[in-house]
Structures are given as structure tokens and as C-alpha cells.
Amino acid sequence: MFSDSHCHMDGFESEQQLMEVLERAAVSNLDIILTMAMSLESSEEAIRLARTHRVVLAAVGIHPWNAVAPTDELCRRLEELATTEGVVALGEIGLDYARSPQTATEQRELLKYEMSLAREKGLPVNLHCREAHADMMGLLRGEAGSGLTGNIHGFSGDSDMLKDWLEIGFYIAIGRAVLRDMPGLEEAVTRIPSDRLLTETDATPRGQSAGPAEVVAVAEKVAALRGVTTEEIGRTATANLKRLLKL
């Protein structure tokens, strides 16, 4: 049993391509595919996919690349989406100063609102963070004791950064970065508590080969680093994701 805690299942050129990816996931024994949103429009598509395919669950939100100031109308629409049946998280949301430093202020304001919405609705957050670790920690530590839960998506940091995320109680999602030669990340992977580990692919319809099924390769590498079986990593990560999503 495996799970992909972060991928993008919208935007396929045809329903047949989507079904082929889902069939590969089924063959690979994936129990959960959590599809992320990038915008209001892709949030709506994530919800449609979750309603249509049992294995797919939906996260809604606005990616930091698309960040704008949280107007009253935007907040109203996000709240409407967050309370729609099939939605289990807010994501992909966060901060990205590497690609979009010019919208740093808008990113922070939007993320503050999205986190408050997640807290109010009892939903976890699936966070993107690139070259914004200090600001992200500042925001999250300000949420201490509020009940906010979530995970860092595609963790690729070292053991020091890992410690920060663990101290605030977040789960750690390991993705395809672990398949590259990154000694700092490999050491960090061995230090993740078993009850905080998630697996993901960040797969998209564009340029991906196996889609969420590639999470098995991620689990294999994590298992090798931690000295356990691939199946154990799959079971552990899936149980953790279900707990985080309150399934």
C-alpha cells in the first residue's frame, strides 16, 4: 500500500491519458492520491477529479507563484471551495522567494489568510517553501497552539531545517529529490520520526512518465536509507497521511 501526498492531476490533454495514469497507480497499489491546486480554477478541477475517482482526494488553494492580495471576493471563493465535499486539505500554498520574490508581500498576506481558513475549517495545509524558510517559520511559530496542522511538501533540506519543521509538529513529505545525490537530504531522511513521514511525487501531466506510481521509487530509496522494506515505508506513509487528513 502506497500513497502520493502531493501531485497535480489536472491538465491532462484527454480523459484517456488521465485514466492511464490512474491505472498505473492502481497496479502499483496506491491507496491515496492527493491532488493539489494552483489557482481557483485548478481547485475546481481538483474537486471534480475527487468526485469522479475514488482514489483521488482534493486540496484547494492558490500557489505562491500565483499569489495576489487576499481580497474579500477571493477570500469568499476560497472559503466556498474549502467547504466543498471531497476537499481534505489546503494546498499547494506557501512562500516562494526563489521564483517570485517580487510578490513576497502578497504571498505572506495570502498565506496568512489561507492558514486561518485551514484552522477555522479543521483542514491541514500542504506547504510549498523555497528560499523563505525564516519567514515561513516565523508565520508557523505564530500559529503555535492554534490547532493548525500540515506538512512541508517536497522537503529537500538538511537536518537543521528538518528540526525546525518537526518542532512545530509538521509532517515531512519526501519526494523525487531523494532520488538525486543529495547527502544532506539523505541524512535528514534517516532522522524523520516514523510517525511524521509522508511520500509524494509532485507529478504533473507535463513531462511525467509514471505519475503518482513513481512514489514507489521514492519509497524504495527512503527504505534503503532507513534500513527497512519498501512495503513498510508505504504502509507507514499511508497511515500517516490518513491520520493527517482525518480519514
Image (cartoon, rainbow, N blue to C red):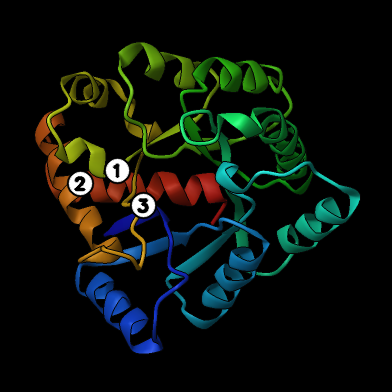
Badge 3 marks a residue whose secondary structure is loop
The crowding category of the residue bearing disc 2, from other C-alpha atoms within 10 Å (few below 14, some 14 to 19, many at least 20), is many
- Which percent across, then down, holds residue 73? 87, 56
Q: Which residue is pictured at 37% across the width and 39% down the height?
A: 154
Residue 175's disc is 1
Marks 3 and 2, how far apart at CA? 14 Å
Q: Is residue 226 left or right of residue 88?
A: left
For the residues bearing labels 2 and 1, Cβ distance under 8 angstroms: no
Q: Earlier in the sequence, mark 3 or mark 2?
A: 3
Q: Is residue 53 above or below residue 16?
A: above
Residue sitting nearer the eye, 104 or 123: 104
Res. 29 mark: none
Kindly identify the amino acid type of the residue bearing the numbered disc 1.
Gly
Residue for badge 2: 219
Residue at (63, 50) in percent of width and height: 62
Q: Residue furthest front?
A: 102
Residue 43, percent from left and from top? 62, 64
Amino acid type indicated by mark 3: Asp
